[in-house]
Amino acid sequence: MSGTLRAGLRLAGSGWAVRGWAGRRRLSQAAAAEGGGAEGGGGGSGSGSGSREAVERLVRAHPVVVFMKGSPAQPLCGFSNAVVQILRLHGVEDYRAHDVLQDPDLRQGIKNYSNWPTIPQVYLNGEFVGGCDILLQMHQNGDLVEELKKLGIRSALLDAEKDQDKK
Amino acid sequence: MPRPPLTAAGRALSAVAERPLAGAIRAKLDAALQPSHLQVLDESPRHGGPPGAETHFAVVVVSGRFAGLSPLQRHRLVHAALSAELAGPLHALAIVARTPEQWDADPRVPPRPPCLGGSKHERRGAAVDATASA
């Protein structure tokens, strides 16, 4: 993804929402030892922000939920940025984005929950859809437009096509 | 801050032999998926890693084992084959997973996005900036 897309950054009306983590308890003993920034390792906790119950609440909170590094306004990882840019191309600006770099419990918990070893992770209607590679594929083959339609979200690309047809 | 790119000499040295993790990835994918085509690309230098870091990889796996499987199922097969590596030093993994027919029809590999620093930005225990929507 190039600087051009980033330059086109704009926050539409409702923008994006990040759940307020301030004040949430973190179980210190559950912080995974990740050494050198590796994504692997054990961890996860019984009742902290990375528990199955907590993650379940997050993925069900909104039709489109993304676990990423950084935020949609400032992604801190190229793969996470790719997810943000793809959603933006489809006009999806209202979604829940969770920065796993802010919460080691969540970072491990989301991997346990989906049994998926990497970040970013995209959930549509509470269901894990995949990471950046899969979202890109879905974008390129038209599946993403269809999946968004099922959620009652009209992809901006449909309107872009319509405009093109008119010219 | 990302490290400066490798010099030509550095790149040449890195390219000489497939390093241990790359070799392990190749061996495990060969064993699990019997690919007709397999590329194991060490992208670590593009993510600020020093020469030989072996942390970020992209794999292009072409295998009949993927027939009838969704992208998610295909990627899970690849993850399963590399579970030990992913629990260890393998930090990031970009995956292209196609059947031989799909590969013949389209042998292009999408470029991976540029690094934006990733976990170097991690702030353990830091207060969170919570931004609410309007």
Image (cartoon, coloured by chain):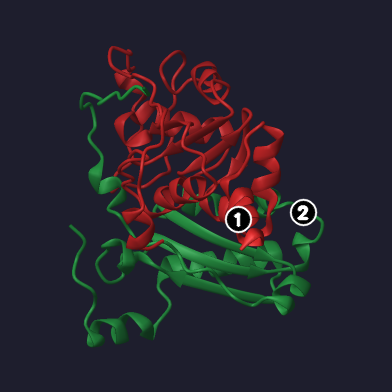
Chain colours: A red, B green
Q: Residue furthest right?
A: B68
Mark 1 — on which chain does it sit?
Answer: A
Question: Residue B104 falls in which quadrant of the image?
Answer: bottom right
Give x and y (percent) for residue A77.
35, 50
Which of the two discs, 2 and 1, sits closer to the camera? 1
Left or right of A140? Residue A10 is left
Residues under numbered marks 2 and 1 in contact, where contact means CB atoms less than 8 Å apart: no
Can residue A72 be seen at all in this image of the molecule? yes
Q: Residues within 10 Å of mark 1 (few under 14, many from 20)?
A: few
Element marked by disc 2: loop
From the viewer's side, name the closer residue of A69 and A125.
A125
In the depicted structure, whether residue A128 falls above or below residue B26: above
In the depicted structure, whether residue A86 falls above or below residue B19: above
Q: CA distance from mark 2 to mark 1?
A: 36 Å
Q: Amino acid at mark 2?
A: Leu
Give x and y (percent) for residue B22.
46, 69
Can residue B79 be seen at all in this image of the molecule? no
Q: Amino acid at mark 1?
A: Asp
Return the mark for residue A163: 1
From the viewer's side, name the closer residue of A66 and B43.
A66
> Residue at the location (75% across, 73% down)?
B100
> Residue at the location (37% across, 40% down)?
A72
> Residue at the location (31% across, 87% down)?
B12
Quadrant containing the N terminus of chain A is bottom left
Q: Which residue is mark 2?
A: B69
Left or right of B84? Residue B20 is left
Element marked by disc 1: helix
> Residue at the location (33% across, 45% down)?
A75
Quadrant containing the C terminus of chain A is bottom right
Give x and y (percent) for residue B99.
74, 68
In the depicted structure, whether residue B107 falls above or below residue A15: below
Same chain letter for marks 2 and 1? no
